[in-house]
Amino acid sequence: MCFPRRHQCAICRLKEIRLLDAAHIVGDAHDRGEPAVNNGLSLCSIHHRAYDQDLVGVTPQYEVQVSERLLDEDDGPMLQLLKEAHGGTIVLPRRVDLRPDRAMLAMRFVRFAGNR
């Protein structure tokens, strides 16, 4: 999957291309999981892993949510950076047709909310 997301992490805005991944919103195993631009987010490696593990979620309104478990922890500067993303908005492509699909985000957010 490729992504035209201004070559930066949608959450923290990191621009080092070697640390960026194309993260599926809905995985390939799901019947709606397809390798399409609107089924993906450009995420740095740490946010990609946190997203896949349901430690970070993105609402259909493009708001970043951090799991309560992480918000309640106190474990150094890297965790603090993750927590600071809570309540922020992801970086979106200028072209509306390339933005993450809200229905797919909603489907994925249900999973995140169930694991908070």
Image (cartoon, rainbow, N blue to C red):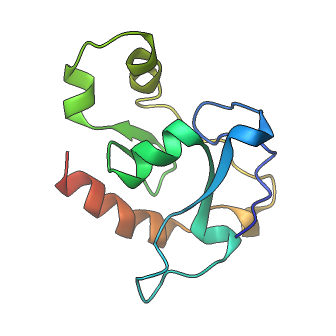
Locate the N terminus and report the quarter of the image it occupies: bottom right
Q: Percent position (x, y) of residue 104?
A: 47, 71
Q: Percent position (x, y) of residue 110?
A: 27, 62
- Quarter of the image holding residue 6? top right
Residue 59 falls left or right of residue 18: left
**Of the pair 48 and 91, the residue shown nearer to us:** 48
Residue 36 falls left or right of residue 33: right
* Residue extending farthest front: 18
Which residue is located at x 45 percent, y 18 percent?
78
Which residue is located at x 19 percent, y 21 percent?
72
Q: Percent position (x, y) of residue 47?
A: 50, 40
Above or below for 94 versus 83: below
Locate the C terminus and report the quarter of the image it occupies: top left
Residue 48 falls left or right of residue 80: right
Q: Percent position (x, y) of residue 83?
A: 38, 23
**Of the pair 84 and 43, the residue shown nearer to us:** 43
Which residue is located at x 32 percent, y 42 percent?
55
Which residue is located at x 46 percent, y 73 percent?
27
- Residue 8 visible in the snapshot: no
Q: How many marks?
A: 0
- Residue 32 visible in the snapshot: yes
